[in-house]
Amino acid sequence: MTRGISRQNSAIPGPQLSDSKPRPEARRPWLAVTAVGMATFCVVTTEMLPVGLFVPITAALEVSVGMGGFMLFVPAILAALLAPLVVLGAKGADRRAILCGLLALLAGANAASALAPSMPWFLAARMLVGFCIGGVWAIAGGLAARLVAPGAVGLATSIIFGGVAVASVLGVPLGAFIGGLAGWRAAFGAMAALCFGVLLLNALSLPPLPAARTLRARQMLSQLGNPALRQGLLITLCLVAGHFMAYTYVRPLLQSLAGFGQGWIGPLLFAYGAAGVAGNFLGGAAAARSPAATLRAIAAGLLLTLLCFSVSGQFRPAAGALLLAWGLAYGAVSVSLQTWMMKAAPDAVEAATSLFVAVFNLGIAAGSLLGVPSVDALGLRANLWLAAALMLAPMAMLARAGRVPPGSR
């Protein structure tokens, strides 16, 4: 337990050193860490890219706004299924080779998305993205302790998972910005080029990384008997599903409900992203002290933001201010949940991380899928109310969790 507690000061938890083989010789370890962080940035940005390009994609491929939710559902559900399977199936394979292979596939998936003539073709490319998401998240999460000295593992892990955090809040506005300049297909083409560049960086900077140890299905499933971890996974599912039920349709909200023109979308989403980065650092510091209290505040903030958006989102100043509040609250979600998982399972971080990645992506899939019938049948406002209602469950769980913090069992 002491080793798990000692890492609480890190903004984002890392794998236990006991899970790793001796570190290989890395000539430039921090370049290698940065390369892995860029890999996580690429995969999460690719996952989120359709959100900022929602309106032009659905218009070009001639599908309804609600049906556009499948652009997030398809890769997210595959990532949820594959994250644990990649860890179990990789066995003794070199992690550098797996990571580079997944980045090559991700570059190809982005190129295929840019060229897709119809929604079925586009969704087929997004299936490849889902495979890459589950693999990259699962592999990258265990590499920090194998690349740097023991005393620097916390910082290295923060950099690797920083790619996830930055992509979660900046990937959408980045795509919207490029799409506004050159069209949505150009945004996916640019992402394909970036993925190929990051592939080369990983191939040149990472040392050979044979498997640290083989994780068996029984060992992973045994973690579901951990009450604190199980509760954290349920909180993750509800928070992420509620957010993405609404956020998948943020561009239609800004254009159709608030009446912002296309030229405003990129700057507004960049402002959302900047607020999210601030939320990531604020949430990380707060969660290190009390993850339950931090997550309660996040759930309450998301609930109020979604309700207020449904009531006053037609007023542009109000919509802009609420978008910033939304970004601030959601920016703290991943780091706070990861901190919870680390404290709940300090001696089984790799297994807990793979389960967390699976449930996180299951939440994305559930939220984007729930929004399909909700938006098409009831409209954008009603969808916000239903998304807000999903925040009630984690708030209830966290009200009880505050009395018994994770890891105290």
Image (cartoon, rainbow, N blue to C red):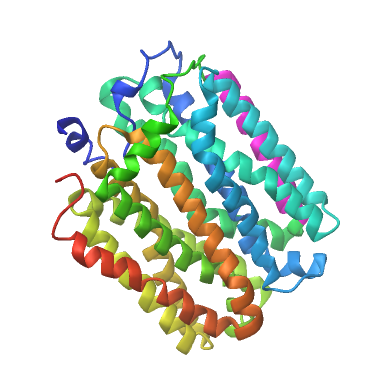
Pick whichever, 401 or 108, lies toward us: 401
Point out residue 282 in the picture as x, y percentages from the top left corner.
29, 56
Is 82 left or right of 350, judged from the image as shown? right
**Residue at point 30%, 28% (across, down):** 16
Point out residue 400 in the picture as x, y percentages from the top left corner.
19, 64
Is 9 left or right of 73, judged from the image as shown? left
Which quarter of the figure is the N terminus placed in?
top left
Pick whichever, 266 or 12, lies toward us: 12
**Residue at point 29%, 61% (across, down):** 295
Give the total number of marks visible in the rendering: 0
| Residue 264: quadrant of the picture | bottom right
**Residue at point 77%, 54% (across, down):** 122
Magenta residues, dominant SS class: helix
Point out residue 193 in the picture as x, y percentages from the top left corner.
70, 39
Point out residue 270 in the picture as x, y percentages from the top left corner.
53, 62
Pick whichever, 390 or 331, lies toward us: 390
